Amino acid sequence: MKEVYPGIFSIREKGNLGVIKPPENVYVLAGKNGLIFDAGYGNIWTIKRLLKEFIKIKKIYIKRNKSFNIERILPSHVHPDHFSGLKRLRNYLGVQIVLTKRMARIIKSRKSFFQYYESADPLKEEYQVKSMRNLLIAYLQKTLSHLFFRLIYGLSFIRNPDIIIEDKAKININGEEWEIFPSPGHSPDHISLYNEEKGILFSGDNILRTITTWLGPPNSDVEQYINSIKKIQNLPHLKLILPAHGSPIKDPKKRIKEILSHRKQRTDQVLKLIQEHPKKGITPNTIIRSLYPQDGSFKQGIARGWCSLTLNMLASQNHVYYVKKNKEIKFYPF
């Protein structure tokens, strides 16, 4: 637990399994009507460790002779590492769960949640060779995913949120006005929390200090992500970004420029590869192997997500087009 700004504490939940379950920041905005931002994992042992840190924060406030009353909890988006702890934290702390309308629809049940993850991607099927191996892997993934999420993340669903808000709203936290605004891209339901007076932004997964935000089908969108980052770039008085993973970002303008530059570089690389094959075209698999020639299938598999989304974007912007023939898809420049 660390006080990252006066009255704002970060509780770092330990992760494991690398990128599958990364360390997670749960933020406590302490005060007379405080709020927890992001709920983290829902495993009982994780929740117990979090509660111990929560009690430490309360003791700090008692020593300071300050009011300590945490009333609500709000996730940045409903990926499992951000909402799985909601139900247990409500039970143990008596806080109210605050969700946007979209979040509430997605995590109301197991069925709605997995439908959300199975939503169609325009080119997803085109990129996949329907071999028996791939079909078997897809079946096992679908069958075992709920058990996996429950065991690894402590996943549980919220049928009865206490407060439902719009994606864009104002919220009072400890007598101060904070702005909630939509910031889709990493996920369609992603929101950010900003206080203009303090210049503090809770960025969720959209802006991380040292690593690249994951983008991939079926629910990410590169163009939306870029637009969200540009919107954040234009926030007045932005001084500090508190991300869901990793340490605070104390030079937000510099980090945002790095992210936008990285995304442009990646887009340009994909477009250049397509432009180099105007007659014969180029397949998505060839693009990925060209971008990651020294990496194995695992790294290339992760890269497939952002690459497919970038191809979607370039096609929608009429920079490229694709042709499917004999189960193979190739991209060509306009």
Image: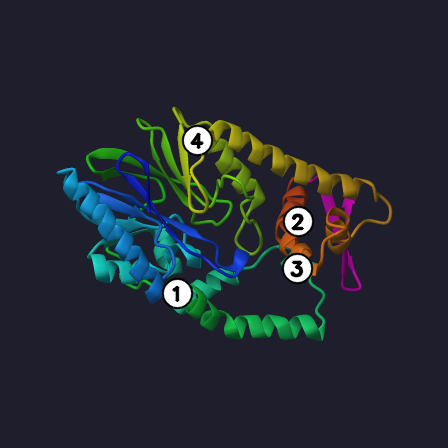
Q: Dot 1: what SS?
A: loop
Q: Dot 4: what SS?
A: loop
313 and 243: which is toward the camera: 243
101 vs 114, left or right, is left
Query: Residue 47 location in percent, x, y?
Result: 32, 60
| First to last magenta residue range | 318-334
**Which residue in the rendered view is the most extreme toward the right?**
279
Residue in view at x 56 percent, y 49 percent? 215
Q: Which residue is mark 1?
A: 155
Query: Residue 164 location in percent, x, y?
Result: 28, 51
Q: How far apart, in angstroms, are the residues tagged by discs 2 and 3?
A: 14 Å
Q: Which residue is mark 4?
A: 250
Q: Amino acid at mark 4?
A: Lys
Q: Which residue is mark 2?
A: 307
Q: Please rate how many residues cluster around mark 4, counting C-alpha atoms within 10 Å: few if below 14, some from 14 to 19, many from 20.
A: some
Q: How far apart, in angstroms, are the residues tagged by discs 2 and 1?
A: 29 Å
N-term mark: 4 or 2: 4
Q: Which mark is residue 164?
A: none
Q: Dot 2: what SS?
A: helix
N-term mark: 3 or 4: 4
Query: Residue 97 location in percent, x, y?
Result: 27, 54
Q: Amino acid at mark 1?
A: Leu
Q: Which residue is mark 3?
A: 298
193 and 218: which is toward the camera: 193
Q: How far apart, in angstroms, are the residues tagged by discs 3 and 4?
A: 33 Å
Residue in view at x 43 percent, y 49 percent? 189
Q: Is residue 264 magenta?
A: no
Residue 307 is at least partly visible in this image: yes
